[in-house]
Amino acid sequence: MKFDISYIFDALPRLLEGALITLQVAILGFCFSIILATFITIAKTSFNSRIFNGFIAFYISFIRGTPLLVQIFLIYYVLPVFGLNLAPFPAGILAITLNSAAFVIEILRGGLASVPKGQFEAAKSLGISGYALWWKIILPQTFITSIPPLVNEFTMVLKATALLSVITVVELMRVSQQIYSANYHPVEVLSATFIIYFLMCFVVSRSSVFLEQRFKVKRA
Amino acid sequence: MKPKFLEVIDINKKFENINALKNVSLNVSKGEVICIIGPSGCGKSTLLRTVNWLTPPDSGKVILKGEIIGSATGKLTFEQNRSLNEFRARIGMVFQQFNVWPHLNALENVVRAQIVVRKRMRDEAEKKAIKILNEVGLKDKIDEWPDNLSGGQKQRLAIARSLAMDPILMLLDEPTSALDPELIGEVLSVLRNLVNEGMTMLIVTHELGFASKFGDKIVFMDAGEIIESGPPNTILKSPKTERLKLFLEKLSLTSL
């Protein structure tokens, strides 16, 4: 069987459509995960409740201690038993969000630990508290130091979306499977898929350098 | 009877097993400059931090112009938190480690709390910030990031940040202790201007020269208690207690 590049060109439009879905799932899932993780981080620090923090610790170890594939199946096939029927796309986003949030919480914990206690105290001594204390003073510093691990986490999310093909989210991997099971040319189609994934991740990880530079330039 | 300006009444604070403050009381009149001295770990910083409730004491009261800042212990209610924030906005605090905000430039450091807490418009806040930065000698550093400022400049920025809130009382926690010797002067000169403007100040300091020249009263603390207090001349020239004598001897030995 020889490598016929024309199959790549034929498949490309559909693959790119799939890549667009991949990006959508990854970006939406990651945004929700950051929002969720941010609120959990604030709640953990503000309430300092043993029960809540224990629950979050349990959630994180549960997510980290089980395969993402199992978590995806769990959300897609087990939630309907409890009356929650989700279409593949939202189910996929939910799975990505819940999975990634566990890791983002840990990343933000590290970022928050690098913000000196005096930063809180200075704000409080001026009468800044609650929402403004977090939003204007603490979170910006937390996120700036967390840029590299957050970008890394996003590339992990981007790659993890390929697993959503198993619950029929029509993203890049799923499209790829559909094409080669119809034309019997997996080598060409998978090569193209491979390169598209790589290009997306490459651009994302380069953006880390850009973002770090941007915030460093401001401060140097 | 006219209420006193600031009253600190019977403050007690325990950390683990250490009595950081034991029944400490202190009265401050308007415009008074009080310097708190004492060996490290004697509770002088803790005392300062209880005044604006940054370190809530176990018992005791702090009263500013007849209003109670705090006497509640344990968790504060929403209302108490709000009134506490209003008090804090009127009490400036300067820290040993400056604690300027590294993600904001100099101007924004001074503007932020004015907008968030005082609800000033941006124009007004910026105008005020520029005026105050000018007064502390940071006119040409307005767009600079804190990481690029020297220690003395950071501390002056921190002082400007507090002054922008129009405080009626300033708490300064060892404002020059983290500075290189040649940078101490520029911060002290800003403080000198504040004294001359009649600002009421509580200063924890090791700068006995500054304390004797500009302090109205020196308070000597040891082991969580106020041992002696009085005008600088009496305290520094004729200490009554053995502990203060010992402390002053040690200080003059190190300054040789």
Image: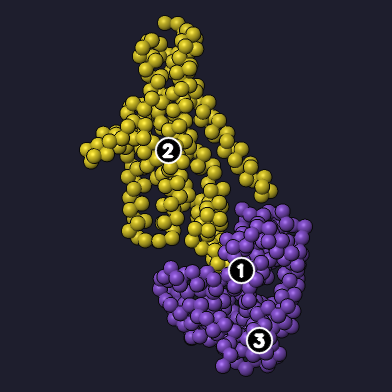
Chain colours: A yellow, B purple
Which chain contains the residue that carries disc 3?
A: B
Say which quadrant the N terminus of chain A sits in: top left
From the viewer's perspective, is A144 left or right of B146? Answer: left
Q: CA distance from mark 1 to mark 2?
A: 42 Å
Residue A84 appears in the rendering: yes
Provide the secondary structure element on which disc 1 rests: loop
Residue B143 pos. (x, y %): 72, 53
Marks 2 and 3: in contact by CB < 8 Å?
A: no
**Residue B73 sits above or below residue A94 on the image:** below
On the image, numbered disc 3 is attached to which residue?
Answer: B217
Q: CA distance from mark 3 to mark 2?
A: 61 Å
User: Given the image, on which type of amino acid does mark 3 rest?
Assistant: Lys
At 44% from the left edge and 23% from the top edge, which residue is drawn?
Answer: A18
Residue A185 pos. (x, y %): 40, 11
At 52% from the left edge and 69% from the top edge, which residue is drawn?
Answer: B85
Residue B6 pos. (x, y %): 57, 83
Residue A178 in which image quadrant: top left
User: Given the image, on which type of amino acid does mark 2 rest?
Assistant: Gly
Residue A48 in which image quadrant: bottom left
Residue B251 appears in the rendering: no
